[in-house]
Image (cartoon, rainbow, N blue to C red):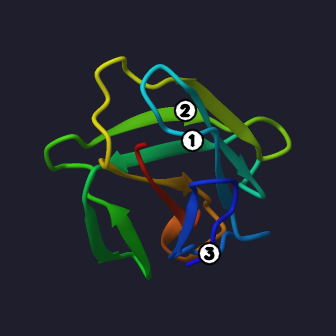
């Protein structure tokens, strides 16, 4: 693992798509009321992107890939979003005011990609710890 932008760490586990391997990066410092961003690049253009997030790691082998965030556990979830015509997507917003210090955060995208194995691609996962 290595730092990407400040506190963000690349957790690995991408699954190549039909044209490229999607790349997820995190931005901002995850502290109470601070803005953070998640930027996806090299994804299939104009497709469905499933943002998985959690406060624990799952590391579940799935369709020749690896799901890193425990999106079904406490503090986890899934958001469905579209990529743009270039295969990019940026989401962001403020951390909640009551964000505790030391909370681990994990994010990863899974994407519809009909030409990829099992018709899905996945970004690397990124992680950070709240400060």
SS at badge 1: strand
Which residue in the structure is indicated by mark 2?
81
Q: Image quadrant of residue 117?
A: bottom right
Q: Is residue 15 above or below residue 72?
A: below
SS at badge 2: strand
Q: Determine the residue positioned at 40% across, 44% down.
A: 130
Q: Is residue 98 visible?
A: yes
Name, please, the residue furthest toward the left. 74
Q: Are marks 3 and 2 in contact (CB under 8 Å)?
A: no
In terms of sequence position, does the residue under pointer 1 or pointer 2 come before the other? Answer: 1
| Inter-mark Cα distance, 1 to 3 | 28 Å
Q: Residue 91: where, in percent of width, then height? A: 62, 30
Q: Residues within 10 Å of mark 2 (few under 14, many from 20)?
A: some
Q: Nearer the viewer, residue 128 or 60?
A: 128
31 relative position to 67: left or right: right
Observer-side mark, 1 or 2, equals 2
113 relative position to 71: left or right: right
Q: Nearer the viewer, residue 35 or 21?
A: 35
Q: Determine the residue positioned at 57% across, 41% down.
A: 48
Q: Is residue 61 above or below residue 38?
A: below
**Rendered image: mark on residue 2:** 3
| Inter-mark Cα distance, 3 to 2 | 27 Å
72 relative position to 35: left or right: left
**Rendered image: mark on residue 36:** none
Q: Determine the residue positioned at 32% across, 29% down.
A: 99
Which residue in the structure is indicated by mark 1?
48
Q: Residue 60: where, in percent of width, then height? A: 28, 74
72 relative position to 26: left or right: left
Q: Image quadrant of residue 88?
A: top right
Q: Are marks 1 and 2 in contact (CB under 8 Å)?
A: yes
């Amino acid at each position: 693992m290595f730092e990407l932008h400040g506190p963000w760490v690349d957790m690995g586990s991408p699954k190549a798509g039909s044209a490229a391997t999607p790349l997820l990066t995190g931005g901002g410092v995850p502290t109470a009321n601070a803005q953070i961003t998640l930027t996806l690049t090299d994804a299939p253009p104009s497709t469905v992107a499933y943002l998985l997030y959690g406060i624990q790691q799952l590391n579940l082998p799935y369709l020749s890939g690896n799901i890193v965030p425990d999106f079904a556990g406490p503090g986890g979830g899934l958001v469905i979003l579209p990529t743009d015509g270039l295969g990019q997507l940026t989401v962001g917003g403020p951390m909640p005011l009551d964000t505790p210090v030391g909370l681990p955060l994990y994010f990863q995208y899974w994407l519809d990609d009909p030409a990829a194995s099992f018709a899905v691609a996945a970004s690397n996962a990124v992680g950070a710890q709240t400060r």
